[in-house]
Amino acid sequence: MAKVYIIGAGPGDPELITVKGQRLLKEADVIIYAGSLVNPAILECAKEGAEIYNSASMTLDEVLEKMTEAASKDFMTVRLHTGDPSVYGAIQEQMDALKKRDIDFEVIPGVSSCFATAAALKQEYTLPGISQTVIITRNAGRTPVPERESLKSLAAHGATMCIFLSITMLDDVVKELISGGYKQDAPIAIVQRASWPDQKIIRATLETICDEIKGKGIDRQAMIVVSPCLSADYDLSRLYAPEFSHMFRKSSK
Ligand code: SAH
C-alpha cells in the first residue's frame, strides 16, 4: 500500500527542503500542504495531475479523510509541514490517527526556522564558555504552556532561546525574560520570514526591542532569539585547537 510521507518543507526558501523530501514531492499523487506558512513555490516540482490541497482551510478530519482516500487507491500522499515537522507541527495527532487506520507513514525531517534564523543572523547558538544549550520554546497563547516551562523559568538558565509563535506578545515575552534574569541591555534579535526574499532582521536590546519593531509590520512568521551569544567574546572551539586530539585528528602539540 502506498505510504503517507510527512515532510519538513523548510523555512521558506524552496531550495531548503531536503533532497529526499523533494524527490518524494515530485513523486506524490496527493499533496496536502500547510498553506499558512509553506512557500507555494515549493509545489512547482509536483507531477502533472497531482491533487494539491491547502490544509489551512481544512480540519484534522478532512486531512485524514484525504489521506485515507488516497491510501485506498494506492496513491502516495505527501503531507508538507513548514520547517521541521516535529516542532509545533501538530503531527502527533495525524500520526496516531494514521496508525489507528493502519496507514503506513514515514517522517522526513526539514530545516527548522530556528536554524534558518541562525543562518540569517550569521550566528552560532552554542559558543564555548557562553552558552552550550538551545531552548526551543514559545509563550503561552491559545495553546497553553506548562507552568514549569514558563519563559520566566527558562530565562533563568541564561541559555540561547529560540522563541516561536510569540511575536504578537513581544511585550509580554520581554517582561518574562527580564523577570527571569536577563538584563535590560541583553541582546535580542528578531528575524521575520527567514530565508524568504523579504526576510527582515531586527537587532536590539530587551529594553529597546518593542520600540524598535514598531511600524515595521513584524506581526507574524517571526523568530525571537535571545542569547548571550549575540554579543559575546567567546573561547575558541576546542574542536579545531592545535593541541586537541580527537577521533579524526592527532594533536600537533
Ligand atoms: N515547524 C516549524 C514551526 C511552526 S510554528 C519550524 O520548524 O520552523 C510557526 C512559527 O515558526 C512562527 O510563528 C514563527 O515563530 C516560526 N517561523 C516559521 N517560519 C519562519 C521563518 N521563515 N522565519 C522566522 N520564523 C519562522
Image (cartoon, rainbow, N blue to C red):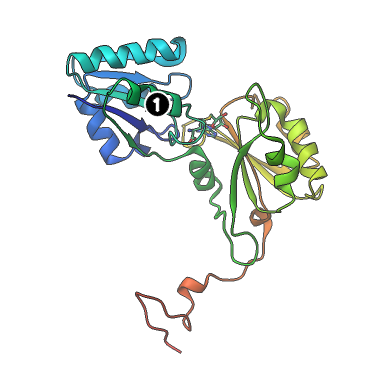
Residue highlighted by disc 1: 96
Coordinates of residue 41 in the picture (x, y in percent): 35, 24
**Does residue 239 show up?**
yes
**Does residue 50 show up?**
no
Coordinates of residue 177 in the picture (x, y in percent): 76, 43
Lateral position of residue 246 relative to residue 187, left or right: left
Lateral position of residue 98 relative to residue 60, left or right: left
* Label 1 near ligand 1 (CB < 8 Å): no
Residue 78 location, quadrant: top left
Q: Height in image: 129 above or below 108?
A: below
Quadrant assignment for the N terminus: top left
Lateral position of residue 16 relative to residue 190, left or right: left
Q: Amino acid at mark 1?
A: Asp
Residue 130 location, quadrant: bottom right
In the image shown, does 118 or 97 lie closer to the viewer? 97
Coordinates of residue 10 in the picture (x, y in percent): 41, 35
In the image shown, does 141 or 165 lie closer to the viewer? 141
Residue 16 location, quadrant: top left
Coordinates of residue 105 in the picture (x, y in percent): 29, 30
> Could you tell me which residue is drawn at 68 percent across and 55 percent down?
228
Lateral position of residue 148 relative to residue 222, left or right: right
Q: Height in image: 153 above or below 54?
A: below
> Could you tell me which residue is drawn at 64 percent across and 56 percent down?
229
Judged from the image, the secondary structure of the residue bearing numbered disc 1 is helix
